[in-house]
Structures are given as C-alpha cells and as structure tokens.
Amino acid sequence: MTKRGQIRPSAPILVSLMLVGGTPARGAIEPSIADRAKSEIAAVRANEALIRELAGMGEVSLVIRDKFLKLRKDATPEERGQLLAVWNADYAKVDAENTKEMWKLLSGRGWFRQSEVGERTASLAFDVVQHSDDLKLQESVLAKMQPLLADHEVRGEDYALLYDRVAIQDGRPQRYGSQGTHCENDKYAVPPDVEDPAHLDQRRAQLGMEPMAAYLAELDDMYGRCEAPAK
C-alpha cells in the first residue's frame, strides 16, 4: 500500500505576533521547544480515551482478518466454503460490535483528523468503517472525510477505498479501482466497472496511491487464488 504521509501537529501552538514582512513583533516571545512539546502532549492526553478506543477497535479488526486470510490463502475451494461459514458465525460479530460503537463515537462530530488522534489511529478507525456492513455509516463517514482531503487530515488511499465501496453498493462505477473483485486466469485484474479506465492511474496518483498493476499484485499475494463469482 502507499506510504503514510507525515503527521501534522496535533495541537495549536502559540505563535508570536508578526509584523508586515515577517519580522517578529517587538517584545514578542516565541514558545520554546519545551513549551511546544508540553502543548503537544497535553493535546494527546486530552484525546487519550478516544485514541485508545479507536486504535483498539481497529487493531482487533486487523488482527482477526490477518489470521483469517492466512488460513484462507492456500485453502481449497471446499475449505474456503468452510472458512466462510466460520466467518459468518463468529468473526462477523466483531464488525457488528464495532459498527455500533462507531456510530456512538461519531455522534455530533466530524471524522477523526490525523492531527487530532494521529495518522495511524485515524486509519485504524477508517478500517472499522471500511469493513462495516452498514452502508449508511459508510456514506456518512465518506461525506465527513471529503472536506478533510485538502488539509491532508485523512489518507487519500482511505478516502478512495471508501468511495469505491460506497459506489459499488449504490450501483455506480468505481473511481479508483480499489475493490478488486474481478478475476482473470485466477489473478486479480482491473475491475470492469471502473470509470474512465484510461486515466485510472492518474486519479490514483492524485491521492497518493500506487499504480494499479502494483496494487493487483499485492491482492494476489494477500488473498491467494482469485475466484470468479459463480454464474
């Protein structure tokens, strides 16, 4: 996947008054690096409970998926059917619980900014939404994420993944080709439902995503043999 961007400062930092031309106002005192560090840690501690809850939900979701995919990767078609039954009976409960909790955490507020909870935690929270079966939650979060793109407060790849997942459920073409559901010769291929395929890599690059060929190779490595839906 694409590399994570630099994390922006997570707390307001006192700045000196500036004269026209950028010269510090006479008598103004700029905060020391120690003061800035104290301000940063105070902001993190103020959001500590939220960070712990978001990161915890996201990590549990990722760990169970990682273990499940390792079992599924080289399984036979019959074994994959058995694994799917186990997923539906046991693993899916985690997504349902996370969905309910995410609605509570988002009540009356926007999406979690990277400068607020940290880049990793914000992306873990996104993973919870991405794997939810609640389309209304996904649509709500997508709308909350969109205005944060310009300020680099959300990862472009996260936005693209959620945009495509919502689009598919709404019966619209994917924009970034992130939902690898198309198989050719047991390998993942560019989905046929991508809008303007000729400029797909260009759109992906605008959000800091890797070229489509590299992404498809990662899907093959992560999921193993690609199985086309039964006709």
Image (cartoon, rainbow, N blue to C red):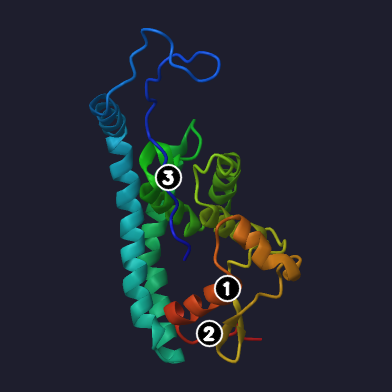
Q: Position of residue 177 (x, y in %)?
A: 63, 67
SS at circle 1: loop
Q: Amino acid at mark 1?
A: Gly
Question: How many neighbours does mark 2 have within 10 angstroms: few (below 14), some (14-19), or many (20 or more)?
Answer: some
Q: Position of residue 18 (x, y in %)?
A: 48, 15
Question: How many neighbours does mark 3 have within 10 angstroms: few (below 14), some (14-19), or many (20 or more)?
Answer: some
Q: Nearer the viewer, residue 5 or 53?
A: 5
Kindly identify which numbered label has been placed on residue 102: 3
Contact, CB < 8 Å: mark 1 with mark 3?
Answer: no
The answer to whether 139 is drawn above or below residue 191 in the figure is: above
Quadrant position of residue 222: bottom left
Kindly identify which numbered label has been placed on residue 226: 2
SS at circle 2: loop
Quadrant position of residue 149: top right
Kindly identify which numbered label has been placed on residue 180: 1
Mark 1 or mark 3: whose residue is earlier in sequence: 3
Q: Position of residue 19 (x, y in %)?
A: 50, 13
Q: Amino acid at mark 2?
A: Cys
In three-dimensional space, the C-alpha distance between marks 1 and 3, rounded to whole angstroms, equals: 26 Å
Q: Amino acid at mark 3?
A: Met
Look at 75% across and 70% down and name the residue there. Answer: 198
